[in-house]
Amino acid sequence: MANLIEMGKNAKAASRVLATMKTEQKNAVLHLIADEIEAQADFVLAQNEKDIADGKAAGLSPAILDRLLLTKKRVGALADDTRGVAELSDPVGSVIEARVLPNGLRLSKRRIPIGVLGVIYEARPNVTIDIAALSLKTGNAAILRGGKETLRSNLALVKIIQTALEKAGLPPSIVQIIDDPDRALVPQFLKLDQYIDMIIPRGGAGLHRLCIEESTIPVITGGMGICHIFVDASANLAETLDIIENAKVQRPSVCNSLDTVLVHRAVAEEFLPQMAARLAKSKVVLRAAPEAFSILNNGDHLAEVHPAGEDDFDTEWLSLILGLKIVDGLDDAIAHIHQHSTEHSDGILTNDLENANRFVDEVNSSAVFVNASTRFNDGGQFGLGAEVAVSTQKLHARGPMGLEELTTYKWIVLGDGHVRG
């Protein structure tokens, strides 16, 4: 069984080494990791093949297997993304604000690393590299706990990272992984507040709830999205078809993919058959509320349509399934989103500026879209580089967590013999 306390002690010591490293040193390590990924690509792919074979034997869904799968192209992208992080500006050491008080004291806020990150995630080996790269760039040590479905792949990737760290003369404990898949270790991991400064869970509602209830360490929840698009009466329907298709089909197994379409009653009769026909080409299965089902049932759109179940509008599909509901208008759409959204990514398709502004003001998701696909809620798409998660909470980070979100700050106070009167 993994010695979590020893891992915590080593990570805390490593974080102090990282905190004093110059940007050039961190970037050099990131390039070493990228080179090592490319050099060891065959080893990583061989380990991933074993994970995939076990996953198929265990009956994992196609959506989960897609998240687990590594290909030559995806491994190459991991190396490219790591080099990309090296090219990003380093937030550590930057001054957020500064001022001089009337008594002459000079105050400033300076960005510093958080310290040690504990990240729990499921079936996404690319997350291993993303976290390692972002943690290194921001001077944070990391302890990783991936899902058992991807254990071999994650171990291979962490071995590559640690090899690069050792080549750079740095402690391999900068990035560690819990190599025992026993779930009993997770509650213990969540109690290491003496060593870990932040927990980031990336997974389903069960994992988030476990972390919130069990952790003695601050938790940033993210990575779970029940995402909506509202088709307003004024929407450009041809453009709307393109956006909905992209949001649902482009990569359905990720957290910013579309789960529910809400359609204004005024355009439902015209729009729903068009949308069903478009999505049928990609074999999207529709789960429709009664009115929408009545319009689509026995139509010639070729889509597979089922009545929506009791929990369908509270389900993150992560697959080619899409919920449909007709609403009376903007108020009805916003009320549905407030009831069912996880505040990840929600959008409106409209040519009515007043409705667009109301939607933006009243829907409080981490990213709110007007006439755009929800698939853009991503660190890379937002120009942040890789991301460690998409936070759906309000403290301290929200939306894609890039470099700045993995830092905190300290006050620097410069005096000249000042004493408080």
Image (cartoon, helix red, strand yellow):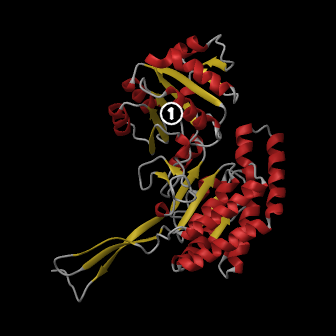
Which residue is found at the position 69% from the left and 68% from the top? 34
Of residue 350 and residue 380, the one placed in the foreground of this image is 350
Which residue is found at the position 69% from the left and 74% from the top? 32
Q: Is residue 421 left or right of residue 96?
A: left
Location of mark 1 (residue): 228
Q: Is residue 290 left or right of residue 396?
A: right
Which quarter of the rendering shows the C terminus?
Answer: bottom left
- Amino acid type of the residue tagged 1 in the rendering: His
Image x and y of residue 119, in percent: 59, 57
Which quarter of the rendering shows the N terminus?
Answer: bottom right
Image x and y of residue 188, in percent: 61, 57
Image x and y of residue 409, in percent: 40, 69
User: Is residue 386 positioned above or below 376 on the image?
Assistant: below
Task: Classify residue 48 by image quadrant.
Answer: bottom right
Question: Is the residue marked by circle 1 packed among few (<14), some (14-19), or many (20+) residues within 10 Å?
Answer: many
Which residue is found at the position 64% from the left and 22% from the top? 277
User: Is residue 325 positioned above or below 166 on the image?
Assistant: above
User: Is residue 413 positioned above or below 111 on the image?
Assistant: below
Which residue is found at the position 38% from the left and 26% from the top? 330
Residue 308 seen by the camera: no
Task: Classify residue 319 by image quadrant.
Answer: top right
SS at circle 1: strand
Of residue 22 and residue 15, the one placed in the foreground of this image is 22
Residue 132 seen by the camera: yes
Image x and y of residue 138, in percent: 52, 69
Q: Is residue 62 left or right of residue 82?
A: right
